[in-house]
Image (cartoon, coloured by chain):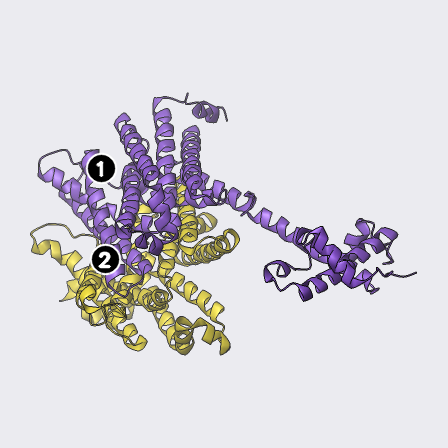
Chain colours: A yellow, B purple
Amino acid sequence: MGAEFVQFSLTPILIGVFSAIACALPGNFLILRRQALIGDAISHVVLPGIVVAFLVTGVVAAIPMLLGAAGAAIVAVILIEAVKRLGNIEPGAAMGVVFTAMFAAGVLILEQTDTSKVHLDVEHALMGNLESLIWFRAEGWHSLLDPAALATLPDELPRIAVVCAIVVALTLIFWRWLKIATFDEGFAQALGIPATALGFGLVVTAAVAAVAAFDAVGSIIVIAMFICPPAAARLMTNRLEHQIWWSAVFATLSAVLGYVFAGYGPLWFGAQNAVSAAGMIASVSGVILGLACLFAPHRNRVGVGKEEAA
Amino acid sequence: MNAFFEALILQAGYNAALVAVGAALLGFAAGSSGTFLFLRKRALVSDAVAHATLPGVALAFMLMVALGGDGRNLIGLLAGSAITAWIGLLLIEWISRRTRLAEDAAIGAVLGVFFGVGIVLLTIVQSMSAGRQAGLESFLLGSTAGMLFQDAVVIAVGGSLAVFATWLMRRPMTLVAFDSEYAAAMGYNVRRIDLLMMGLVLAVTVIGLKLVGLILIVAMLIIPAVTARFWTDRSGRVIWIAGTIGGLSGYLGAVLSASAPALPTGPIIVLVAAALFVLSLLLAPRRGVLAAVLRHRRFQRRVHRRQGLLALAARHAIRETYTLRLLTKEGLVRPDGVPTDIGRAQAAKVARDERRWDVAREIHQDAGLTGRYDGLTPIEEVFTADEIAEFDRRLGPPVAVGGA
């Protein structure tokens, strides 16, 4: 746990933890509102957003890409709603139509333009590249106090930290509204809470979290981060407050364990190379969810008899 | 353009023709077997199934290499992907049945986790035999360039079997899709039929993996079914229309992609399907947006015309411009709002019908008949001539309305 850890593992672990928490918080509400798969749709349309942002600006810079991805997510949400209303189509199918079409457009544009010189390829977008986010200048724990070294931290770390802080702040500010609107939308509207706008805001927040986390863990694995920790937390408790805490704990646990297993696990088995950290984080979150499904105290649906559930 | 037509009539070379036929067959199979998934409101299960194939591909590769074979044997890879996809399906079913989590959470969890596991395994494959793993990534986005005759045969045989099974099981699957509780009461095993339905989707996913990749095969399963739904209300026809739309997008997509460089087949096929979807959304005869707008306009016109005539009968001035324009165009009023003779006659008729309805509601207790009063339906369509004569007898002789 010395200099090498700070240099190679500290930043990826922190980025993983921040991404996981930033996704898990909105995920809690999405799951309770039965909109879990909106995360799926968002994560797929991030690709066309980034590609278009690259085409427009011509540079691989973080801010335009984040804006492009967030824009694509908002366009996708609007299109899904439009298809749902205009075509009278159920939400799942509307999502399926919109995000696959947008994803296909993204791949097409990517193939059409010569992006081979820049660091922008489909596999990276899908799988993430957590391992590459290392802190070159770090020489040990004391580097944390050295401004010169801190300035060379990978950009992704402050970015995801800020997004995570914003998500936490939004969750705290809108806590009562979110809670009421999630469980009883009609009651919320009767109280004068703008439930529709709140729902849209939740989706946009989720999109921003997905886009920021996308850098680190890739677009597909974001889905696991949206769903697995909150779903496992849902099985642990009947109180929303506790559920949020559980989901944050599970998210952190997945990120840390996932990174450690990916980086050091293969060495324990005598293999030479590390495996994909993003994939491993998703796998660990899946294992946690699996354990929760088997053993968590509140796993059963209300009204399911003991014998039937056994 | 010339290249496009050459490809369209399968003259752009052996490989292009092979891909076009293969894509059309795959599109047909995916469209028709995706139909019931859509009707059962489970379209996104196909997304989870598709992502859950990835670990299977990697595991099958590792196993085949460990046994000393060629890791890239297509049949072996497809078998592996089918196994993990099936495990994913069973997990979704188990989670949503046994825990309090909703099905969408189960779908998302399985999708993300299986894909994550798949990526971990892919990185292991990459490190264990560098150079020999070439091509496994192509399962992500598909690759048609290397399509062999053998692949086309796999698609043709597997696709036909899937379509045949869909056709064979259409009645129980329709029943389950529209009213699963009634199906259960009839003695059908709903759970088994659901699994069979998803198994068909799985089969199509697996055979389409190589061609369009695991992310875009989802589009081939969902979009044609949703598109077909615009054109008919009969489930039996949706299957065939969805198949046709899928086949058409596969064929056109493959042809387009063969006609120019840097047009990857998978995305083009999906975009053709999406274009067909948008066209149907706008233009479909009954469920389309255009039809809905026209229907609304027609209704609006009837309401305004009727209200305008009633106003004429009551000798009120019409100030609403749309109504005024409507009545002027029909020659019922002059531009200054004074009714013409025809207008007066029409107004008298409308006013009389309104009085007839009043009487009808008084003497008829039958809500099935009087309930059809909406201010628009002509009374002659609801009551017989004898009944109307009876209303008129109670109303007394006609009175002149509408001015001098």
Depth check, front residue: B157 or B397:
B397
**Can see residue A118?**
no
Depicted B397 relative to depicted B223: above or below: below
**Image check: B381 left or right of B82?**
right
- Asked whether, in this view, residue A180 is left or right of residue B96, the answer is right
Residue B140 falls in which quadrant of the image? top left
Amino acid type, label 2: Trp
**Residue type at numbered disc 1:** Ala
Residue at horizontal 46 percent and vertical 70 percent from the top: A198
Which residue carries the number 2 mark?
Answer: B94
Report the front residue among A82 and B140: A82
The residue labelled by disc 1 is B134
Residue A183 image offset from top left, x and y in percent? 39, 72
Disc 2/disc 1 C-alpha distance (Å): 35 Å
Residue drawn at the location 42% of the way across and 46% of the way down = A101
Q: Which of marks 2 and 1 is nearer the N terminus?
A: 2
Image height of B146 relative to A89, above or below:
above
Side of B300 relative to B348 (left or right): left
**Residue at left 48%, top 43%?**
B277
